[in-house]
Amino acid sequence: MSILRQMILSVLVLAGALYLWIAYVPSARPMLDRLGVSELLGIEVAQNEEENGAGPGFGGGATRVVVEEVTERTLADRVRAIGDGQARRAVVVRSETVGLVTELHVAPGGQVDSGQVVAQLQNEAETIALERAQIMVEDATDNLRRLRQLEGTVTEVRLREAELALRTAQLELRQARLDLAQREILAPISGRVGIIDVEVGERVAAQEALFTITDRSALLIDFRVPERVISQLSVGMPVTVTPLGLRGTVLNGEISAVDTIVDRASRTLRVQGRVENSEDLLRVGMAFEVEMSFPGETLVSIAPLALQWSSEGAFVWAVREGKAARVPVEIRQRNADSVLVEADLAPGEAIVTEGVQNLRPGAAVEVANGRDEVRATWTPDRPVRTE
């Protein structure tokens, strides 16, 4: 009895599965009819269904579908590269002469202006030399004045010697002023002071580096691009910059310089971008991801839900003259809200996004989402390829 019960249950399960297959799979009835099973089971295939190719849908007539219109969009050719940030200007401050540091007027990270005194060297000897030179100039000036007053009794040689002495004293005065000025170390540019490598009371040598001043009001980013986009590069072209250390921060910049020589090994070209740093978030040496977009060809844009797959590749269902037409597509670019494809589709044409499971080529369709009747039953003005 248990075996008989199992056989009965198996037959019931198979019968139920066959019923569901016939009810919900559009190709089931034609297949059963071709195999001669329809007559055996007593299933009649409607004549209009065979002629029109309409699937069962929800009521045995036209299949209700939801459609969206085909649009056009431009394919974006994006290039991404990693680059290093450099200061707009960076200068190492050095002492021009040997001396003892007596004062430091800056601190690490401080802002300085061009020409500002940042350090002072011991200058007593230079101050004395300047005063001596000033006295020598005054004495030489008085001596020349007296000789000119005695012009009739003074030889030409003595007058020339006095003039030469005055000029020599004036040169020594200029030298003394220069020596004294070199005891003050000035900021060559405006910017931020880096780490200071000397202390007050320390003796420095001529041309010894004291610290670095960087102007980071704007950063220059060096990166490389493939040679295929060289013809589309130009100074002033916008770029998008993302600091790798500041995820979520996206900045707008522009190309400031383009090199003239392609690297033979990598087949890339060096490019320099510029990004403003008004909020002082960026630092020299940071790594950046730079993205550039180049205009490409115009392609057909479809909704992602319309895209279907088969053993032959991707395709969509288009609604043409009230019937379903299978149109092969070649995917060129996927976006979050659209897919750019190459296909025999025109802007404004309706493609099916919902109800595709009940469609086959030539099946009658009924648009269920209230689209304009003309667009939903779009008629091509040029020959189209259907499969």
Image (cartoon, helix red, strand yellow):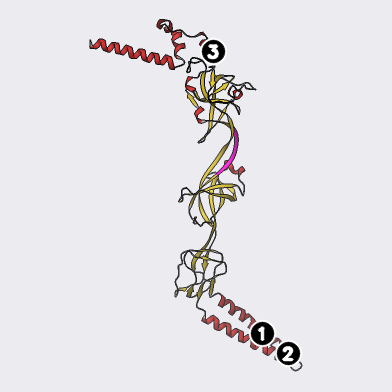
Secondary structure mostly seen in the magenta stretch: strand
Q: Given contact means CB atoms under 8 Å apart, are the residues at marks 3 and 1 in contact?
A: no
Q: Position of residue 373 (x, y in %)?
A: 59, 23
Query: Vertical placement of 338 versus 322: above or below?
Result: below
Q: Residues within 10 Å of mark 2 (few under 14, many from 20)?
A: few
Q: Residue at x 43, y 15 (%)?
A: 23
What type is the residue that disc 2 sits on? Arg
Of all residues, the one furthest to the right in this rendering is: 152
**Which quarter of the figure has residue 301?**
top right
Which comes sooner in the sequence, label 3 or label 1? 3
Identify the residue under disc 3: 52
Q: Position of residue 305 (x, y in %)?
A: 49, 29
Query: Vertical placement of 72 versus 291: above or below?
Result: above
Q: Given contact means CB atoms under 8 Å apart, are the residues at marks 3 and 2 in contact?
A: no
Q: Position of residue 175 (x, y in %)?
A: 60, 78
Local SS, label 2: helix
Residue 340 among magenta residues:
no
Q: Given contact means CB atoms under 8 Å apart, are the residues at marks 1 and 2 in contact?
A: no
Of all residues, the one furthest to the left in this rendering is: 1
Left-right relation of 110 to 349: left
Question: In the rendered image, which quarter contains the N terminus?
Answer: top left
Q: Residue at x 51, y 74 (%)?
A: 120
Local SS, label 3: helix
Q: Which residues are magenta?
A: 292-298
Identify the residue under disc 2: 148
Q: Residue at x 42, y 7 (%)?
A: 37
Of all residues, the one furthest to the front in this rendering is: 370
Q: Residues within 10 Å of mark 1 (few under 14, many from 20)?
A: many
